[in-house]
Every structure is written in structure tokens, then in C-alpha cells.
């Protein structure tokens, strides 16, 4: 699946919805059923650690520089400030059959799961 439509787009919202995360860009929507690591320039933060939510929300307003979805391996979203959102998509690292979904328009009607 190609998620390159988010390259050049601004992260406009980070939404915590019960047990999953939604990352909204100017149009596209990335829904993650597993929690990505936030790789900052000095350190990284994982779900459950202090400052995880703050680190993610601090990225609102940043523009996507690179985005890659390598199904069965990893999802990486690099922002222009150097922060990387990284999620392992390896079967042994996931709790369910799907790791997330992507919608190029932001609508749930056209989202594709990965």
C-alpha cells in the first residue's frame, strides 16, 4: 500500500480513541491499532512511558518529509523536524491481524487496512 500522499502534508491532529490512535493530515487519515514509537533527536518514547502523549501531540503542525509502509515489516513517518513515528508491522510484534488502516481522503468508506 502506498501512503506517499501524506508526504508534504501537515499533521493536523493526533486523536487517542480508546485503544487505537488516529493521525490526521490535511486530508489523509492514518489509523493505528498498535502504538508507534516516537523517535526524537535525543531520545525515543514508547506507549506507556511518561511524556508519550505529549511527544506525539507536540508533532501537530509538523510536515511529513518521508512516509513508508513496508507491509509485514514497518511503518515509518519522518517529519521535517527530524522526528520519526515508527511502528513494527512484524506479526510477532502485533496483537491482532491488522496494524492499522489508511484513507487517502480521510473518510472511513475508502480506508484500506494493513
Image: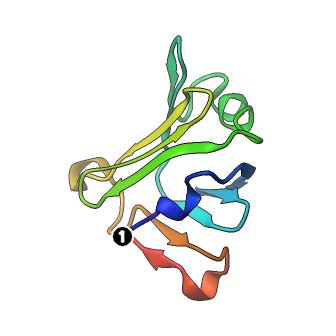
The answer to whether 108 is drawn above or below residue 21 in the figure is below
- At x 49%, y 69%, the residue is 101
Identify which residue, 92 or 85, lies in the foreground.
Answer: 85
User: Dot 1 corresponds to which residue?
Assistant: 1
Identify which residue, 96 or 22, lies in the foreground.
Answer: 22
Q: Residue furthest top?
A: 42
- At x 56%, y 63%, the residue is 31
Percent coordinates x, y for residue 47 in the rendering: 54, 35
> Can residue 17 be seen by looking at this rendering?
no
Element marked by disc 1: loop
> Can residue 33 be seen by looking at this rendering?
yes
Percent coordinates x, y for residue 75 in the rendering: 39, 50
Percent coordinates x, y for residue 71 in the rendering: 28, 61
Q: Residue furthest front?
A: 8
The answer to whether 14 is drawn above or below residue 57 in the figure is below
The part of the image, by quadrant, that contains residue 65 is: top right
Amino acid at each position: 500500500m502506498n501512503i506517499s500522499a501524506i508526504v508534504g502534508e501537515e499533521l493536523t491532529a493526533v486523536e487517542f480513541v480508546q485503544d487505537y490512535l488516529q493521525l490526521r493530515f490535511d486530508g489523509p487519515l492514518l489509523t493505528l491499532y498498535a502504538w508507534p514509537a516516537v523517535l526524537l533527536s535525543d531520545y525515543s518514547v514508547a506507549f506507556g512511558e511518561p511524556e508519550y502523549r505529549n511527544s506525539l501531540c507536540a508533532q501537530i503542525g509538523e510536515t511529513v518529509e518521508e512516509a513508508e509502509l513496508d507491509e509485514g515489516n514497518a511503518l515509518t513517518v519522518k517529519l521535517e523536524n527530524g522526528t520519526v513515528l515508527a511502528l513494527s508491522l512484524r506479526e510477532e510484534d502485533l496483537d491482532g491481524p491488522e496494524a492499522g488502516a489508511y484513507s487517502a481522503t480521510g473518510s472511513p468508506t475508502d480506508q484500506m487496512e494493513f
